[in-house]
Amino acid sequence: MTPIDFRTEPGRYRHWRIVLEDEIAFLVMDVDPAGGLSPDYELKLNSYDLAVDIELNDAVQRLRFEHPEVRAVVIKSGKENVFCAGANIRMLGKASHGLKVNFCKFTNETRLAIEDASKNSKQIYLCAVNGTAAGGGYELALATDHIMLVDDRRSSVALPETPLLAVLPGTGGITRVTDKRKVRRDFADVFCSTEEGVRGQKAVDWRLVDEVIQKSKWDETVKARARELAARSDRPRAAQGIKLTPLDRKISDNGITYPHVRVEIERERGLATVTVRAPTRAAPATLEAAHALGAFFWPLAFARELEDAILHLRVNEPAIGLVVFRTEGDAQSVLDHDAFLAHNQDNWLMREVRHYVKRVLKRIDVSAKTFVALVEPGTCFAGTLAELVFASDRSVMLVGKRDGDNRQPAAIALSEANFGFYPMGNGLTRLQTRFLGEDESIERAKAKIGAPIEGKEAQELGLVTFAYEAFDWDDEIRVMLEERASFSPDALTGMEANIRFAGPETMETKIFGRLTAWQNWIFQRPNSVGEKGALKLYGSGVQPTFDRERV
Amino acid sequence: MTPIDFRTEPGRYRHWRIVLEDEIAFLVMDVDPAGGLSPDYELKLNSYDLAVDIELNDAVQRLRFEHPEVRAVVIKSGKENVFCAGANIRMLGKASHGLKVNFCKFTNETRLAIEDASKNSKQIYLCAVNGTAAGGGYELALATDHIMLVDDRRSSVALPETPLLAVLPGTGGITRVTDKRKVRRDFADVFCSTEEGVRGQKAVDWRLVDEVIQKSKWDETVKARARELAARSDRPRAAQGIKLTPLDRKISDNGITYPHVRVEIERERGLATVTVRAPTRAAPATLEAAHALGAFFWPLAFARELEDAILHLRVNEPAIGLVVFRTEGDAQSVLDHDAFLAHNQDNWLMREVRHYVKRVLKRIDVSAKTFVALVEPGTCFAGTLAELVFASDRSVMLVGKRDGDNRQPAAIALSEANFGFYPMGNGLTRLQTRFLGEDESIERAKAKIGAPIEGKEAQELGLVTFAYEAFDWDDEIRVMLEERASFSPDALTGMEANIRFAGPETMETKIFGRLTAWQNWIFQRPNSVGEKGALKLYGSGVQPTFDRERV
C-alpha cells in the first residue's frame, strides 16, 4: 500500500481554494468527488476523507506562516446549496477500525488548530454556512469563532450521526455543542437525535449558530463580519510571510531521513527510534536574520520534520508501538534558540513558531504509541528538546560515562521554554502536569535553568524516571522495551490516554479523552460496524438490525 | 435467570464483617469462595464479584445511617497474607460485555460512596493493607483517605491489569493514582505495567500508600491512625442511629411495586415508567419526629426504593432502554419536606438523607438508559422531585388541562433543594449544568422558589424542553418515544454520556467519562476478550496472542 502522505501545498490542492482579499482569506471547500484516498468511494456533496483534511490542515498552517496580513478567515463552500455533508460514510463503512480512529484523531487536531489560530495567532475564523452542514460539516463550523447560517428555508446544521449511522459525531461536535456553545443539555439531546437538523431562528435560539442571514444580504454580511473579526486582530499589517518550503524527506523500508530528524524502524521489536538533531548553526543574531531563514529557522524546521514523522508512524506504521526518542548535537545551541524565541516573543513569526512547536508536541501526547526518552552521552535534551523527555511515558538517563567514551556525561538542561512555551491540552505545561500539586518541585527545576543536569541530579529533581550506571544500562533498556512490546497494544493505548493527562480537563482533553473513547467503543460495536450495523448498511436501502441491550 | 438482588443486610453477609469498637468500625473483607453470584467461579484470595460488592455497598450505607457514633472506618482483610486480589478474573472472563460494564459501574459507585462518606459524613475511611492488594484490591484502598501497608517484605500494592489481563483497572485506579494521589505520570506508567506491584518504602516514595508499618507494630498503629482520623470527625457521639429496614418490594413480570415507587414495564416498547409518589403525610413537626420515622421518613424512603428500581433496571432489564419518570401526589408536601431538610441541615441524620438522595440521583446520571420526564396534571415535580426533570435527557410538559380533567394544570415547583442539595458528579447542581454560562437563568429560576410554574412559563424559564397543548400531546409523546427506541442503544449511551456532563470535570466525571469509556472499548477488543485474548486465557497456561496494531 502507498503510504499516506501528509505533505501538500496549495498548488496541488484538489479540494480547497484559498482566496485572498487583503486582510481576509476565504477558505473555499470544493471537494473533488474523485479526489479521495481510495477509488472505493466518491466524495459527493463536499463530504470528506483524510485527503481532504490533509489539505485543510496545510491551508490552516500556511495561512498562519505565509500570510501575516490575513486577520480573518472565512470558511465557506464552493458548491451550491450544500456546505459540507461531513465525513464520507462509505469511506467510514469500509475503513478499518484503526484507520477510523486515526482519521478522527487527525481531523480533531485540525479543528483544534483552527481554534488555536483564532485564539493565539489572532487569525480569526468564521464559518459562512451557505448550505446544509451535516455531521463533520457542522463540526467544522463549530471550530470557528462565529457561525453564520443562510436563511433560505432549507439550509440547516445537523449532527445526524446517532439517528443515521449509530455512531457519535467524531470531531468534537458534542463537546463543542455543550461546552463551547453551551447549548442546553436537553436541546443538545434533541439536536443530536434529529436527522434533518435545525435551521432558521431556532438554530440561533438554541445557540447552534450565531446568526441567520437572508440570502439577499449574505455576501455583504459575511464580509462585514469578517472585517469586524479582523479589526480585533493584532497581526501586523505590513509584515512579510515566510514560505513553508517542501519537506526534504527520504523514506526507505526501515526508516525516514530528514535534515534534522531521523527515524529508524526495527520491525521485529515493534520499535522506531526518532533522533532529533540540534541546530548546526548559531541562533540568529537579529529578527531580520531569523525571518530570512524562514522555514530553515531551526525550531520551525525540526518541528515540521518531527510532525511529519509522528503522523507517518501513526498512520503508516500501526504495528510499531514503541517510539524511542534520542537527540544529538549541541545543547547550548538549542538553549540559544529558546532564548531567541523568548526574547522576541512579541514578534508575529516567533509567536507562530512557538505555537506550532506546541501543537507538534501535543500530537505526541495523543499518539497511540509508547514513548521512551533515552538520555545518554552525546544527546542534547535541552530546553525545547527536553520537552521530548517530559512528553515521554518514561525516561531513562545514563549516570556518568561509558568505558572508552570521552564525551561529557549525559545531561538535561532546562530553559524558559519548559515553563510556559508549550502547554499541553490540559492547559498545564508538561512539568506542571508532571509535578501536579508539587509547586516546590517546579521551583527547584526553575532554579536550574541553563545548567547541565546530570543523571543522579536529574533523578533527584524528578526530571527523569530512572538513572542507570553504564554497567546496568543495556540490560535495563532491553528488558524494559521487550516487556513493553509484549503487552496488549489496546490496553497500553487506554492506559497511556489516562495517565498522560492528570489534573484539569479542558474541551481539548474532553474531546480526546472522553468523546474519542466513547466513539472508539461505538466503532467496535456490532450495532454500527457489524454486518447488520448502521454504518455498514448506510445507503444500501436495508435497515440496520440492532441488538437492543443497553450497555 | 434469577434477577440480581441489591438488597441485603449484615445478618445475611457472606463476605464482610462489621466489627464495632466505639468510634471505630472495622470492615473486614473475608470473601466466601463459594458465595459468588455464579457457581462457575470460586472467589479465591478475597477476589470479588458483584455479590461481594453488593454487601460492601450495603455496609457503607448502613454505617452512615445506623451508626452515627462511628467516626472512622478501617477496611482490612480477614485472610492471612492477602488483602484482596481484585475482581475475580474467571468471572470477568465469562461475563457478557454488558455485565462487565454494569459490574464496573456499580463498584465505581461504591468506591465513590466511600469517598463521599469520608468527606461529607465525616465517617472517615482508612485502609489497612495487611497483605497483597492487587487490581481492584488496591483500587478499594485508593478510595480511602489513608492507606497503610504492612512492611513484611512481601505485601505489595499493584495494578497488574494491563500486563496480566490486557485490560485497564476498572474501578478508577488510574484516575485516583494520577489525580488523587498525584503519583508522577512516569511512575504511574511503571506501576501500572508492573505485575508484581510495589512494596515497602518505594510505595511511600511514589505516593502509592501513605505509610508502611512493621508487622510488630501493625495493629496498634492502625488503631492509632483510626483514632486520629476519628478525632477529625464532627459526628455526634451520643446520637442514636436509625435502622434501614428491609425494602418492601413486589416484583412481577411487568413491573415492581414499592410503597412510594412503581415501575411498569412495556417490553414491546422497550420502556419502563417509573412513578414516584409524594409523601402521604405532612413533614415531621420536629427533628425527634423525623428520627422516630427512621427509614419511613419520606425522602429516605422514596430514595431507597428509587435506587433499588434503577439498579434493578440497569442489571436485570438491559433491553429496556427508555425510562419515563412520572410523579403523583401532593407537591406541597414535597416542598415541606425539602424545607424541613433545609431547616435541619446541621443534624447528622438530615445530612445523611441529603447526601443519600444526591447519590441516588447520580445513579440516574450515569445509567445507560434514556430518561424522559412527563409533566402532566396530577404530577408533583416539586423541589427534590423536580430533580427528576433536570436529570432527564428531555422533559415534556402539558399546557393547560385536558378536556374533562378537573385537576389543576401541570406545574413544576422549585425549592432550595434545586439550588445546592444534590450536586452532580461535575460538582454543579443540575440547574447549573443546565444553565451553564447563564447565571441570569439560575437567578430567574431562584426567584420562583415555592410558586407553581405552569407549562408555558416553565418553557420560558428553560425548565422543560417542550410544552405541548393537550391536543398535540399524545402524538408528540408517542413519536418521541418510538423514535428514541429505534436508535442504536450504543450510540445513545455514548451520546448521553457526553451530553449529560457539560462544564467542569472532576475525578468522578473522569472516572465515569474517560476511564470507563476506554475500559469499555478495551472490553470489546479481541486482545482482551477474543478467543486468544488475555482475559479469556488467563489461568489456562496458554499465552495470549495479540494483534500488534496500535489503535
Image (tube, coloured by chain):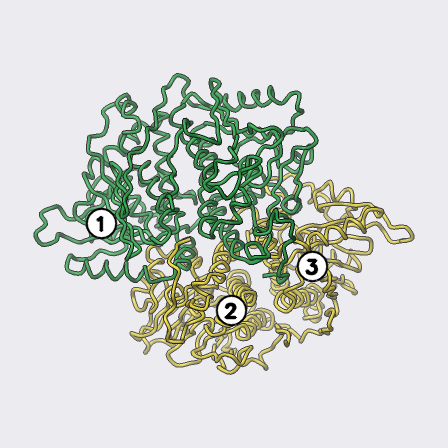
Chain colours: A green, B yellow
Circles 1 and 2: CB atoms closer than 8 Å: no
The Cα atoms of the two marked residues, 3 and 1, are separated by: 57 Å
Q: Nearer the viewer, mark 3 or mark 2?
A: 3
Give SS at disc 2: loop
Q: Chain of mark 2?
A: B
Residue under numbered circle 2: B71
| Figure quadrant of the N terminus of chain B | bottom right
Q: Please rate how many residues cluster around mark 2, counting C-alpha atoms within 10 Å: few if below 14, some from 14 to 19, many from 20.
A: many
Q: Amino acid at mark 3?
A: Val
Residue A7 screen position, x and y as percent = 37, 35
Is B353 in front, or is A141? A141
Q: Nearer the viewer, mark 1 or mark 2?
A: 1
The Cα atoms of the two marked residues, 1 and 2, are separated by: 50 Å
Same chain letter for marks 3 and 2: yes
How many numbered marks appear?
Answer: 3
Residue under numbered circle 1: A375
Residue under numbered circle 3: B323
Circles 3 and 2: CB atoms closer than 8 Å: no
